């Protein structure tokens, strides 16, 4: 039986070898890059990037164990430059000892180090004083400065699959030494399936829920109903970071689903963001943007409906207002698509940046004074409403250097089909 029941189950069940690591076969299986490096005795400084509870700390410890190195750990949340220097002093002592020993320095949440703290690591990584292993849930290319990142090998860890979580739960239930030491039928299969789903790819969360469920089941003395399970599970949110990569990945998925005319996928990503605690007001702003960028004049009603949804949410709040936003998302997804206005606007801005302050042609300048009229302001201007069809054909409105420029090219979709016909008539 387990001799250290005071330690959390998640800590007790931490893998002791690469073979025990679940869900990261692309790094740890035979022939995989991290395993090959360790077996060849080449332990590189690295950053382990992945969602919470997938084994970043575990892999760092296994690297140190495999290389028989001194293992030092810092948390970027608490540590400063002084702590870094103290760790480096220990590493230098180990390196200069009669029996030299390598040092693995593990820095959890390394993305929280500022530029100065990251720079303080550089010389020690460069000269091999330490093998640096950083763990982060954030994209290293955004959060680590280029000088440090160039000295680190990036290993991407994946969220655990449902099969991997199920295997982890089974191992914890049957391991008499470290786990619960119970039979696999100690909890109903339905409970284990719910725990697997609620873990959402996070091994630590899975084991915490398992331990809680096991203790609750024992206390209930066999009365295992759905109400008890709901108390155990609580309301766990899926992986979502309001300021991190998951946030931007999911809003990107929502936008691209709308652009790709898939209302079902768009609703899914919208529901995922709400489930993760996203600010609905931000999502609404992006929906308005989608209406302008991806639907445009192919269906001008899309923008009006998006603004109506924004107003409805502003008035009703959550959860009532969320349905109005869902309605707008579905409409945008099935509407005719055109980015012609978006493309034309970008091209016009690009021209302005490249050509600078070109003069307004004299004939379309305002002429409120006698002097301005004397200088030719407004001379030769043809008032469109006095022309046939209310259009002064051939009149130039661009600066001379840009005469004849075309930005807006309507598509043959939705209302823009008629707009294209009208433009062709005007341009003739």
Image (spheres, rainbow, N blue to C red):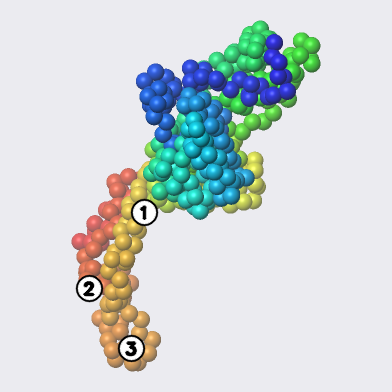
Residue 6 place in picture, x, y as percent: 73, 23
User: Where is mark 3, residue-wise?
Assistant: 372
Note whether residue 83 is visible.
yes
Label 1, secondary structure: give it.
Answer: helix
Specify whether residue 305 is in view. Answer: no
Q: Does the CB distance between marks 3 and 2 fall below 8 Å?
A: no
| N-term-proximal mark, 2 vs 1 | 1
Task: Give the vertical position of 336 relative to 192 (above or below).
Answer: below
Q: Is residue 202 left or right of residue 339?
A: right
Label 1 or label 3, whichever comes before in sequence order: 1
Mark 1 — residue? 342
Residue 225 at x, y = what percent?
73, 15
Between 428 and 311, the one lying in front of the other is 311
> Mark 2 sits on what residue?
400
Depth order, front residue of 411/200: 200
Residue located farthest toward the front when viewing the structure as drawn: 98
The residue drawn where x is 65% and y is 12% is 177
- Residue located at (40% from left, 26% from top): 41
Q: Is residue 187 left or right of residue 81?
A: right
Q: Give neighbour class at mark 1: few <14, some 14-19, many 20+ (Cα, 10 Å).
A: some
Q: Is the N terminus in the top left, top right, bottom left or bottom right quadrant? A: top right
Dot 1 and dot 3 residues touching (CB under 8 Å): no
Q: Residue at x 58, y 22 (%)?
A: 14
The tag earlier along the polypeptide, 3 or 2, is 3
């Amino acid at each position: 039986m387990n001799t250290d029941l005071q330690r959390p189950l998640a800590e007790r069940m931490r893998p002791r070898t690469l073979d025990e690591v679940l869900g990261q076969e692309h790094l740890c299986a035979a022939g995989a890059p991290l395993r090959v490096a360790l077996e060849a005795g080449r332990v590189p400084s690295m950053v382990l990037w992945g969602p919470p509870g997938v084994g970043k700390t575990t892999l760092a410890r296994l690297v140190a164990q495999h290389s028989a190195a001194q293992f030092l750990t810092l948390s970027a949340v608490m540590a400063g430059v002084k702590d870094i220097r103290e760790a480096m002093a220990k590493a230098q002592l180990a390196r200069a000892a009669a029996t030299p020993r390598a040092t693995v320095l593990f820095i959890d949440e390394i993305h929280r180090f500022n530029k100065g703290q990251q720079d303080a690591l550089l010389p020690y990584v460069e000269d091999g004083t330490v093998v640096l292993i950083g763990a982060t849930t954030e994209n290293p290319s955004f959060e680590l400065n280029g000088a440090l990142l160039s000295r680190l090998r990036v290993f991407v860890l994946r969220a655990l699959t449902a099969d991997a979580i199920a295997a982890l739960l089974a191992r914890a239930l049957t391991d008499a030494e470290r786990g619960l030491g119970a039979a696999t039928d100690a909890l109903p299969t339905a409970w284990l399936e719910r725990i697997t789903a609620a873990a959402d790819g996070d091994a630590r969360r899975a084991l915490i829920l398992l331990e809680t469920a096991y203790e609750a089941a024992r206390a209930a003395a066999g009365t295992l109903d759905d109400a008890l399970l709901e108390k155990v599970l609580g309301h766990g949110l899926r992986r979502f970071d309001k300021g991190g990569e998951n946030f931007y990945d999911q809003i990107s998925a929502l936008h691209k689903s709308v652009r790709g005319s898939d209302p079902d996928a768009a609703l899914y990503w919208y529901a995922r963001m709400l489930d993760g605690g996203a600010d609905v007001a931000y999502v609404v702003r992006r929906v308005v943007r989608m209406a302008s960028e991806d639907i445009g004049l192919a269906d001008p009603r899309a923008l009006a409906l998006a603004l109506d949804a924004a107003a409805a949410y502003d008035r009703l709040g959550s959860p009532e207002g969320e349905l109005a936003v869902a309605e707008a998302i579905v409409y945008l997804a099935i509407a005719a698509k055109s980015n012609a206005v978006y493309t034309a606007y970008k091209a016009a801005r690009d021209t302005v940046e490249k050509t600078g302050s070109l003069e307004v042609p004299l004939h379309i300048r305002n002429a409120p004074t006698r002097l301005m009229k004397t200088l030719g302001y407004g001379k030769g201007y043809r008032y469109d409403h006095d022309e046939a069809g209310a259009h002064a054909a051939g009149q130039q409105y661009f600066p001379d250097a840009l005469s004849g420029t075309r930005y807006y090219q309507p598509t043959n979709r939705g209302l823009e089909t008629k707009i294209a016909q009208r433009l062709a008539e005007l341009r003739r």
